[in-house]
Image (spheres, rainbow, N blue to C red):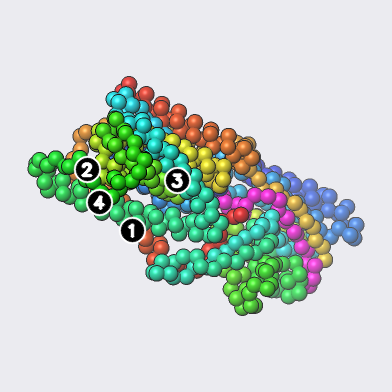
Amino acid sequence: MQIYLPIAELSLDVFLLLGLGAVIGFLSGLFGVGGGFLMTPLLIFIGVPPPVAVATQANNVVASSISGVLAHLRRGNVDIKMGVVLLVGGLIGSTAGVSLFKLLRDIGQINLVINLSYVLLLGSLGLLMTWEGGKALVYRRRQRGRAKLHRHTWLHGLPLKMRFRRSRLYISVFLPLGIGAGIGVLSAIMGVGGGFVLVPAMIYILGMPTSVVIGTSLFQIIFVAANVTFLQAVQNQTVDIVLALLLLLGGVVGAQYGSRTATHLPGDALRILLGVLVLLTGGRLLYDLVSVPADLYVLGPTP
Amino acid sequence: MTRLLRTVLPGLLALLLVVLPVRSTQPNEPLVADLSEHLVAITMGFAGSEVLLFGAVDMPGDVVVVVQGPKREVRMHRKSRVLGIWMNTASMTFAAVPSYYAVNASGPLDQIALPQVRARQQMGLEHLELPLPRAKASPNVAEAWRDALIRAKAREGHYHAEVGKVRFLGQRLFRADIRFPANVPTGSYTVETYYLRDGRVVGAQTTPLMVGKVGVEAEIHDFAYNRASLYGLVAITIALVAGWAAHSVFRKT
């Protein structure tokens, strides 16, 4: 059954979109990832214009993060103060990012930048996942040594220090602000929540305790993704509500089964599988960038 | 809708036959033509559409139908390899490009229409007027951009590279199917019907055709463009409610 998407201006199969939402939802439930980094390239593969794919996916990130953050808030695993500082950075970054998006679109380079960002991101992410999964599979029984809470680098010498009680940190406010801004730009250009970059950054750069990292990152992702959705809708008119709704419906159901299945399956092997999937997606995008195009001339976006 | 008209069509044509003898006594009306519908409505389940053009001529001859979509500004990019990656390195803006173009004819164009007629009435893609900023490019470069634009529009399904059929039922009644793809550009179209004898135009008629989103599709599109901030907020609210609902359902099960 075909459905016409009013903003993307093409018609796609309803069940394909529901299925896509369900599969990505399942994976995100299974691995505890947002899934945006897979959904956006897949939408582009099935013909959705990249700007519409990115903006619509940002809206879906809001939905997939809210349920996670509610659970973490109940358990008190959110450092609100840190979240707000990250968020201020995130709002600045995403606002700048959406303007950058518009600029790139006007000069005809947006598709290249989206694709290139995805190749870099999926490539490194896929390698990391496969590597980590492989390592865990091999050394499953070996106990992990306690890592140092955090190392002191020049980053910790920055001025304007602030105390974050929940995270037991006393660091310069510029650190979370900068990280938040960086993720904000990423979120605007790629339509991802950015949790997979934010979480390691919070652990390794800020030195936050792992217990509050996920909740806090989800907390700020909601607001940044909402900001991206709003600005994309206002500046670029690229949020397709019908597409978002179909993906959401599938995603909601898929995510439930995903997180239920997660407890019964060998996580490490699946992590390798996801890593390979991510690598394949990135590889396909890279191939499109380096192979000789069928026609050197392409239509630009309609002004 | 189209199927319904298809069943009604024989009746319509019969009606034309009855009307025709009266019409043909008037020498200034050698051609009558009309469309099965004057609006291509893009609805929720829209997956392309077909419009039927039917009509009659007063004497045996040939018929050419040229369909053009609303003119738009179009930008083209040319890719070249930079550090191993193909990126857009040059661009060209065409001021007024028909967003849709299709030709139907009762025979091969070069046999039924004189070259000057084809050029003047823009019959066939090679005669399509695509004005380029003249100062910008030398003639052969301009030609390359022009050809590229036609190729790109054909890939999108907006330009029909092949000439469609005009079928004669008997010697005076004719019909042509005009096919629109799912991604058809919206706006007001013109359907030009030319009646030719000995390669010359002896009758012509222009029929307007609207292609537009209707119902929910139109409302969502207008909402997104005219009240963008509210649209953004609604999108976010839907996402929040969906996420929250998923969370509460998940807790119970």
Q: Under tag 1, what secondary structure?
A: helix
Q: B74 or B119, which lies in front? A: B74
Q: Residue at x 41, y 45 (%)?
A: A181
Q: B210 or B94, which lies in front? A: B94
Q: Which residue is disc 3 drawn over? A: A93
Q: Which residue is disc 2 drawn over? A: A150
Horizontal side of residue A106 vs B83, given as left or right: right
- Which quadrant would residue A71 be assigned to in this image? top left
Q: Which residue is disc 1 drawn over? A: A283
Circle nearer the viewer, 4 or 3: 3
Q: Under tag 2, what secondary structure?
A: loop
Label placed on residue A151: none
Place of residue A259 in the rendered image (x, y in percent of width and height, measured from the top left): 28, 33
Q: Under tag 4, what secondary structure?
A: helix
Question: Which label's residue is closer to the chain start, 1 or 4?
Answer: 4
User: Mark 1 to mark 2: distance in Å?
Assistant: 35 Å
Q: Name the chain under label 3.
A: A
Callout 4 touching callout 3 (CB < 8 Å): no
Place of residue B125 in the rendered image (x, y in percent of width and height, measured from the top left): 65, 67
Label placed on residue A128: 4
Residue B195 is a magenta residue: yes
Horizontal side of residue B151 vs A200, given as left or right: right
Circle nearer the viewer, 1 or 2: 2
